[in-house]
Amino acid sequence: MKPIAFALLALIYASPTFAGRMLVSHLDADYHASFEPGPYTLDPASAQDFMRTSIDWVRNGSTKPFLFVESSIIPPYVEKLPNGLINGNKAFHADGEIGLKNAGYSAGTDYVRADAAQLVNELKNLGAYSAIVVASDFGGILTGAELEQLRLQKDLIASFVANGGGLYAMAESNDGIGRYNPATGEADPEATAPGYLAAGNGLLGSETPYGFLPVPVTSKSSYGQYVKNSTLTPFGADLGFTKGMLDGNESPIYFNPSPGWTPISYDSNGRISNMAAIYTGRDASIVPEPETYLLAGTVLIAIGLYRRQK
């Protein structure tokens, strides 16, 4: 094959319709971005910066909204103050959509939120979205119900990413406050009254963290680890991250080395804290989008014209 043919075919495979961006993080940025600085929220500005950088990278310049996956439950809490407000020092979960809004994203314009029930339809409509952004379960309010729907549509998600869609999944640890009343958010690990749910150690129940990813990862719990002295890799810097985005908050997990994933950063113990991957889906059965056929046709025409000129 002539050099021009090689160049044009390379253009096809470089096209976003043949590869998508994925990022997994040890940080529950949605939680930390949701509050003013405090005993547990610590540095919301760095969490907002991290979340913006992650979302912008996986969207890869697309102007389509992203799909934000999170439950609709009342965030579980441990204690209310005498004035009826939730004690912020004992609020271990938060609605991650608040963090999105604090980071500058607007509902309906920049993102659409979907819980487990809504995902049934939204995952069939992924062409309308630039990326899937999955909330954390601790301190966000992702539950096993959302993970189940994502897992059931794992092949659909793989096709979406392989054809240029993005995927950003925040920390999934299944840690948290244990038993809670979904109608009120009130938590009590010892509760036996009707209405209280036991969801494993947290909100995910028996669902495996990150079980919906096209390329598997292995994560480990590191409950309550304060993040400082992180190491940013050159790859992470190329993606737009800075060291200031990495430190200052607590993290519930870390990652083991996972084939296909490249570390963005390491924690102070040398463990992987954030990873990214480009997924082409060449091992899956992917149906190209219409614009992919158009590009391929253009390449074939160009090759034909080149040969006729010879």
Image (cartoon, rainbow, N blue to C red):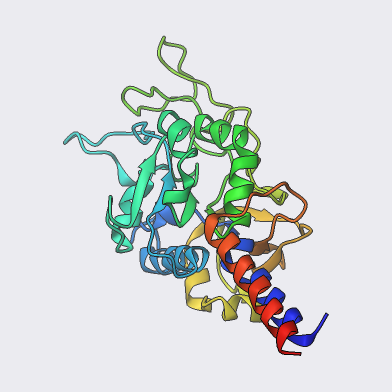
- Residue at x-position 48% and y-position 24%: 179
Residue nearest the viewer, comparing 171 with 52: 52
Residue nearest the viewer, comparing 148 with 160: 160
- Is residue 178 shown to the viewer in this render? yes
Q: Position of residue 302 (x, y in %)?
A: 65, 78
Find the residue positioned furthest to the front.
308
- Residue at x-position 38% and y-position 48%: 96
Q: Position of residue 82 (x, y in %)?
A: 19, 34
Residue nearest the viewer, comparing 1 with 10: 1
**Could you tell whether 54 is left or right of 109 in the image?**
right
**Could you tell whether 210 is left or right of 96 in the image?**
right
Q: Is residue 260 above or below residue 301?
A: above
Find the residue positioned furthest to the top.
194
**What is the total number of numbered labels drawn onto the structure image?**
0
Give the image quarter of residue 102: bottom left
- Is residue 19 shown to the viewer in this render? no
Give the image quarter of residue 254: bottom right
**Could you tell whether 186 is left or right of 175 in the image?**
left
Q: Position of residue 256 (x, y in %)?
A: 75, 56
- Residue at x-position 63% and y-position 28%: 206
- Residue at x-position 51% and y-position 57%: 250
Q: Is residue 110 above or below residue 86?
A: below
Residue nearest the viewer, comparing 297 with 291: 297
**Could you tell whether 102 is left or right of 295 in the image?**
left
Q: Position of residue 226 (x, y in %)?
A: 54, 60
Image quarter where the C terminus lies is bottom right
Q: Is residue 36 above or below residue 152?
A: below
Find the residue positioned furthest to the right.
1
